[in-house]
Image (spheres, rainbow, N blue to C red):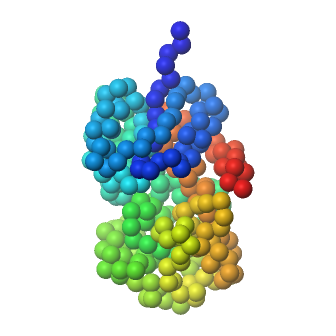
Amino acid sequence: MSAEPDSYGVVGHPVGHSLSPFIHGMFARATGQAMSYRLYDVPSDGLAGFITGFFERGGRGLNVTVPHKIAAAAAASELTPRATHAAAVNTLALRDDGTVLGDNTDGVGLVHDLCDNLGLVITNRRLLIIGAGGATRGVLAPLLGLSPSLAVIANRTPERAAALAAAFADLGATQGVGFGDVGTEPFDLIINATSASLSGEMPPVPAAVVGRGTVCYDLAYGRAATAFVSWARALGCAQALQGWGMLVEQAAEAFRLWRGIRPATAPVLAALKERSR
């Protein structure tokens, strides 16, 4: 008899829309890994008990999605430096000694997409991040590791943007401002880290921040162009992109943590884009 495949999954609430089983299923087949991957819809008040039980029953790893990324950090025995910076985890991995490592692969996934897939140069470039919530906190440290000349965080509440910028100031040049105070000079890269784009809304960011050489990247993704992507294209930016690449690349980093091998991402990204048409 063959051994049971190692058990993995993604926990969130809701989670039925998640593409993670599709992505990790392709990764497993491509790398010859014997593993199962399931969806777990768990409300916030049941999260701690679910995570403990999952690993006690022999589970090997979990992805964590909204709204549990911050709470799941408390379930880890130890956090990686990037998860500590993010104050949130999106990946939990059982180690050989029975302890659970918490990691955050969102930022490094974004960096892989920007630099490796899209060929962008971030070093000495001006970066604008729209939003000062958990998504921004999750990607800021890896982005600052690429040494942009300045990373401006813009938020509806300027104080929140300023506090987040100050928390990461030891990693690079950061500034936190309100939407109306981002200036009138175009940025090299603009990242939308708000969820408003999916509901058809666009934060009131001045059009002057987009120039002909500006690359605009929405962390969100969907079948149709997001509001942010449509806004950026209408302003004549160089490129306007959805976060499909980040989705696949952060998953590949989680897979590497679990299985010790980083799968090729191009076939999965192509399949996802074809599926989303």
- Compare residues 105 and 26 and report the one nearer the observer: 26
Q: Is residue 3 above or below residue 90?
A: above
Residue 76 placement (x, y as % from top left): 30, 42
Is residue 164 in sight in this rendering? yes
- Compare residues 185 and 231 and report the one nearer the observer: 231
Q: Residue at x 50, y 23 (%)?
A: 5
Instruction: Name the quarter where the C terminus is drawn.
Output: bottom right
Q: How many marks?
A: 0
Residue 139 placement (x, y as % from top left): 45, 61
The quadrant where residue 24 appears: top right
Q: Residue at x 56, y 84 (%)?
A: 209
Q: Residue at x 48, y 67 (%)?
A: 195
Q: Residue at x 44, y 72 (%)?
A: 131
Q: Is residue 174 above or below residue 100?
A: below
Left or right of residue 119, residue 165 in this image = left
The quadrant where residue 276 appears: bottom right
Q: Residue furthest bottom?
A: 184
Is residue 191 in sight in this rendering? no
Residue 103 placement (x, y as % from top left): 39, 47
Residue 3 placement (x, y as % from top left): 50, 15
